[in-house]
Amino acid sequence: GVDEGYRWSNNFEPVLYSISQVAAGRTLLADLPTQYGLYAEFIGPLVAKFRFSIFGLTMLFASMSAFSYLALARVFHTVAESLLSRVLWAIGAALIINNVWLSSEPYYQYWPIRFFFPSVAVLIFSAIISKGCRLNHAACFSVFLTCGVIWNLDSGIPALGAFFAYLVLSTFFSDTQHRRIWLRVIVVSVGAVVATFAAFAAYMTCKAGAAI
């Protein structure tokens, strides 16, 4: 049955429980711990407003997986010149994403949580570097990546760290004039990260009625 085995107890149940508790008005870290990050604070209000069933929630995660796949496919399509390589990537990625065939895992919850923000970040980063990394682009992207860290530490920190590694390396290998520009971008990005963390902490504190 659905309540037997690791597929329920080790994956779906922990994910569903935190979302249901946030939808019921509780606050993560204040009223209960969370296993995969604070993603439930993003999804829970949607569940409460639209009253998702388990089927609806599963479809939401399935849509997130599909969007993540399409985001990466779009980027690969722009960088790969060979049609054969594009087709092989599409087939390989479709087989790997969600590990449905590999681990007999029928649920979409595990992958979307760790996969969504990094995949969308790759798409956004590709657009940013194609147009040049401006201050407003870096600030908005830093806010998005910080939300990814809050959503799930496992995948959020590497994504945010990769962006700052790009900024630091771009600064290091630039000439003096452009180095000043990159330094301003770093300062703005750090400020955006700090402001986002502070805003979310204030939101959680107000929601819980006590310091988190």
Image (cartoon, rainbow, N blue to C red):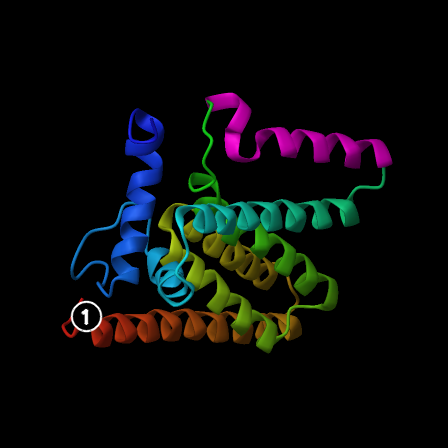
Q: Position of residue 116 (x, y in %)?
A: 51, 50
Rendering quarter of residue 205: bottom left
Q: Position of residue 167 (x, y in %)?
A: 55, 61
* In the rendered image, the vertical position of residue 54 relative to residue 4, given as above or below: below
Q: Is residue 121 magenta?
A: no
Q: Residue at x 72, y 50 (%)?
A: 74
Q: Quadrant of the N terminus?
A: top left
Q: Position of residue 114 (x, y in %)?
A: 45, 45
Q: Is residue 98 left or right of residue 25?
A: right
Q: Residues within 10 Å of mark 1 (few under 14, many from 20)?
A: some
Q: Residue at x 62, y 44 (%)?
A: 69
Q: Front-most of 107 and 202? A: 107
Q: Residue at x 20, y 58 (%)?
A: 29
Amino acid residing under circle 1: Ala
Magenta span: 83-103
Q: Front-most of 18 and 162? A: 18
Secondary structure character of the magenta stretch overall: helix
Residue corresponding to mark 1: 208
